Image (tube, rainbow, N blue to C red):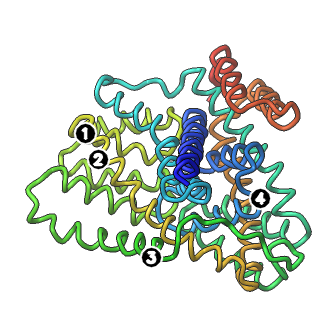
């Protein structure tokens, strides 16, 4: 029995190390913002590793779009929890977050002037993001937006997202798509079949405890802040609330951080803008901009503190809702609504392919040619994503930047 227990521990540790390694690779190569991150996740977790099926990935993405916090990071955390429980969620988050957080902390400590945002290799990585999102659309569209009703929902979602580009608009589009699915779809896949259950490796009691902790910190931290004569406490409170109350993630959190950090004197307006420029150039979640502010204010320890604080609420919400989410998504009513939501996710991805990715990246026929080649490398030649990223960076360095 002891020997079997040891083998079980070794298997769990191997699974955690694999989760960390795969998510770290994504953290090093996922350029292009939250929507592009989901495309990278789809390619790695669904297509290559097959750790989660198309339907479950789309349902998890839909859930994370409804929750406050960094949606793409929360999808990664959710896959880690499905794979290996709470330690798996932590390993997945750490791997995806560490590269960009470390880069931004290093910039805050050692670099005083930006200016790397328009270099050729950065532009090449943006072209890679265009190819990755197009590739994800190629697969997700066939699986999640097939048929006249679902394709109509996807197109309508794309049109509305382009005409109403805001986090509120995105939430309302998803809600309307759920209503359309309820009215016009029998089930999430147009067949009425119950989706396969997710093997959630945490129980409902653990989930309820995570939700309770989320709300407790949201209430208690501000209450005791006036009595805590500590910059660290104030920073943790500010960044926890920013992570807990922002919908849409990414760029939406930046105004919140500016209002918290600049008036408090933790960082100057010029430093804030310089860090924002660098944050656009590194891979991984934009929420790691918190690491830059924390490091600029209080060194490496401050960077670690603010990073944990801003991501903690999103982690607690995913861990808290997943045990209840799987039962809900298998309900016939929820299945039809999720069918519409999943189609809308495809539409939102299509809209993001045009704005901001296409508009800010493809400025010449050479850019389009490079994107086409990179797409072929992914879709037809089945090359690993790191090869495509490296090829895009090298090609971009050899090309003039046109945008």
Sequence-wise first label, 4 or 1: 4
Sequence-wise first label, 3 or 1: 3
Q: CA distance from mark 2 to mark 4?
A: 35 Å
Q: CA distance from mark 1 to mark 2?
A: 6 Å
Which residue position is annotated with label 3?
Answer: 208
Classify mark 1: helix, strand or loop: helix
Q: CA distance from mark 4 to mark 1?
A: 39 Å
* Quadrant in the rendering for residue 105: top left
Q: Are marks 1 and 2 in contact (CB under 8 Å)?
A: yes
Residue 54 is marked as 4
Q: Residue 82: horizontal and vertical position, in percent?
A: 61, 59
Q: Nearer the viewer, mark 2 or mark 3?
A: 3
- Number of numbered markers: 4
* Quadrant in the rendering for residue 164: bottom right
Which residue position is annotated with label 2?
Answer: 305
Residue drawn where x is 41% and y is 69% of the image: 210
Q: Residue 331: horizontal and vertical position, in percent?
A: 71, 83
Classify mark 2: helix, strand or loop: helix
Q: Is residue 100 above or below residue 167?
A: above
Q: Residues within 10 Å of mark 1 (few under 14, many from 20)?
A: some
Residue drawn where x is 69% and y is 41% of the image: 358
Q: Are marks 2 and 4 in contact (CB under 8 Å)?
A: no
Classify mark 4: helix, strand or loop: helix
Residue drawn where x is 66% and y is 21% of the image: 396
Q: CA distance from mark 3 to mark 4?
A: 27 Å
Which residue position is annotated with label 1?
Answer: 301
Q: Residues within 10 Å of mark 2 (few under 14, many from 20)?
A: many
Outermost residue, top side = 398
Q: Residues within 10 Å of mark 3 (few under 14, many from 20)?
A: some
């Amino acid at each position: 029995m002891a020997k079997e227990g040891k083998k079980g521990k070794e298997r769990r540790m191997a699974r955690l190390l694999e989760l960390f390694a795969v998510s770290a690779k994504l953290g090093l190569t996922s350029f292009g913002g939250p929507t592009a991150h989901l495309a990278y996740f789809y390619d790695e977790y669904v297509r290559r590793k097959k750790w989660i099926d198309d339907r479950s990935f789309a349902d998890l993405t839909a859930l994370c779009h409804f929750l406050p916090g960094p949606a793409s990071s929360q999808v990664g955390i959710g896959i880690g929890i499905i794979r290996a429980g709470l330690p798996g969620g932590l390993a997945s988050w750490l791997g995806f977050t560490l590269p960009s957080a470390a880069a931004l902390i290093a910039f805050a400590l050692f670099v005083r002037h930006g200016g790397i945002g328009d270099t050729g290799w950065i532009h090449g990585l943006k072209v890679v993001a265009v190819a990755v999102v197009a590739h994800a659309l190629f697969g997700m569209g066939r699986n999640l937006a097939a048929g006249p009703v679902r394709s109509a929902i996807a197109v309508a979602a794309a049109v509305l997202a382009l005409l109403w580009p805001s986090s509120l608009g995105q939430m309302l589009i998803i809600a309307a798509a759920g209503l359309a699915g309820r009215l016009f779809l029998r089930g999430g896949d147009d067949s009425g079949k119950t989706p396969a259950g997710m093997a959630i490796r945490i129980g409902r009691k653990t989930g309820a405890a995570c939700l309770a902790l989320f709300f407790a910190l949201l209430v208690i931290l501000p209450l005791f802040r006036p009595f805590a004569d500590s910059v660290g406490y104030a920073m943790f409170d500010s960044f926890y609330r920013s992570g807990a109350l922002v919908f849409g993630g990414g760029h939406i959190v930046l105004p919140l951080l500016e209002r918290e950090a600049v008036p408090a004197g933790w960082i100057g307006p010029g430093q804030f803008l310089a860090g924002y420029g660098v944050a656009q150039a590194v891979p991984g979640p934009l929420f790691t901009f918190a690491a830059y502010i924390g490091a600029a204010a209080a060194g490496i320890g401050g960077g670690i503190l603010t990073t944990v604080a801003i991501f903690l609420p999103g982690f607690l919400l995913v861990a808290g809702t997943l045990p209840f989410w799987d039962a809900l998504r298998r309900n016939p009513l929820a299945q039809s609504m999720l069918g519409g939501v999943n189609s809308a996710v495809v539409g939102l991805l299509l809209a993001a392919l045009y704005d901001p990715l296409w508009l800010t990246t493809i400025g010449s026929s050479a850019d389009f040619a490079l994107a086409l080649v990179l797409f072929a490398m992914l879709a037809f030649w089945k090359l690993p994503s790191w090869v495509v990223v490296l090829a895009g960076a090298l090609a971009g360095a050899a090309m003039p930047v046109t945008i």
